[in-house]
Amino acid sequence: MQFVRNLENLFELACSNGASRRRVAAVYPHDAHTQEAVEGALKRGFADFILVGRVAELQALPFVDEYADRIEFVDVPDSDEAARVAVQIVRDGGADVLMKGKLNTDNLLRAVLNKEHGILPPGTVLSHITVAEVPNRDKLLIYSDVAVIPEPTLAQREAMMGYLVKLSHTLGIKTPRVALIHFTEKVNPKFPVSTDYVALKEMAAQGRWGDVIVDGPMDIPTALEPEAGQIKGIISPIEGQADCLMMPDIQAANVFYKTISHFGGATNAGMLVGTMAPVVLPSRGDTTEGKLASLALACVAAMH
């Protein structure tokens, strides 16, 4: 399996099965950023689209004629109804990926999480996972959860670990190194996340997630820089070469997401997982490149 080292490799993997392009249901794609991502995916050749929204406007988009055989339209004038219709298309097997356009995330999630007609199987944990290309780093960085679970329980962390490992394997990382992030390396009952981490390490040692290395708690430098652990005298199988970071909570994860983008020049690609199909929820602040990479990531995940 191809080792996906950077976002260009991700696009190559997304295009590797050209005869079976993923079908993306785009919900109310009436904003310029979503339309640019749709056009970019069509140009790169890794996705076909079902555009759910005001058809007269969508058919007038400048790239539609060029890709007429790869675009379908469903005429729905209201954004909330478009979310319901697109989710039903995914539920019925008509699309492999769901993508948010010009509507509030809460409105889309209401359709996704509908107990009768949504696409989250009963008993499944909804979470978010991000893949970042960071300048001067020789491989991608995978981490969770920046958008969904405020303060994960141990059971939710179990599910999140499974998502991290599965995506790592999908991206060609045979034995992913998952660092359990905290502000200190010490386990302290005052911080329940640290005791959760002890339980996760025990599960990993027992083969809960297959071929994976899990260690922590540790801080970001110890997870990502071999010298940091050496200076602190920390011996860890992560060895400062983490592929994945499990963040302690949504606050830490979201701040990390925005910090590496703003100050570090990182490009983040993200999606919801746990659903019947990957869901792309681009933020208004994401670049077009990030939105396109999120689409590619979701299409790759949908292949497995």
Image (cartoon, rainbow, N blue to C red):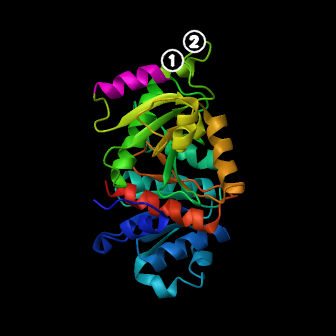
Whichever of labels 2 and 1 marks the residue nearer the N terminus, that label is 2
Marking on residue 189: 2
Q: Amino acid at mark 2?
A: Pro
Residue 103, position in %: x, y?
65, 56
Give the tally of numbered discs. 2
Q: Amino acid at mark 1?
A: Thr
Residue at 32% across / 26% down in the picture? 205
| CA neighbours of label 2 inside 10 A, class few (<14), some (14 to 19), many (20+) | few
Q: Is residue 302 left or right of residue 115?
A: left
Is residue 76 something one can see in this rendering?
no
Query: In this rendering, is residue 271 above or below 180?
Result: below
Looking at the image, which is closer to me, 151 or 257?
257
Q: Quadrant of residue 46?
A: bottom left
Percent coordinates x, y for residue 272 in the rendering: 50, 47
Which span is picked out in magenta?
Answer: 197-206
Q: Is residue 202 magenta?
A: yes
Q: Position of residue 144 (x, y in %)?
A: 53, 41
Query: Is there CB contact under 8 Å for labels 2 and 1?
Result: yes
Q: Residue, x 42% and y 29% (percent of image)?
A: 158
Q: Main secondary structure of the magenta part?
A: helix
Question: Residue 130 location in percent, x, y?
Answer: 53, 49
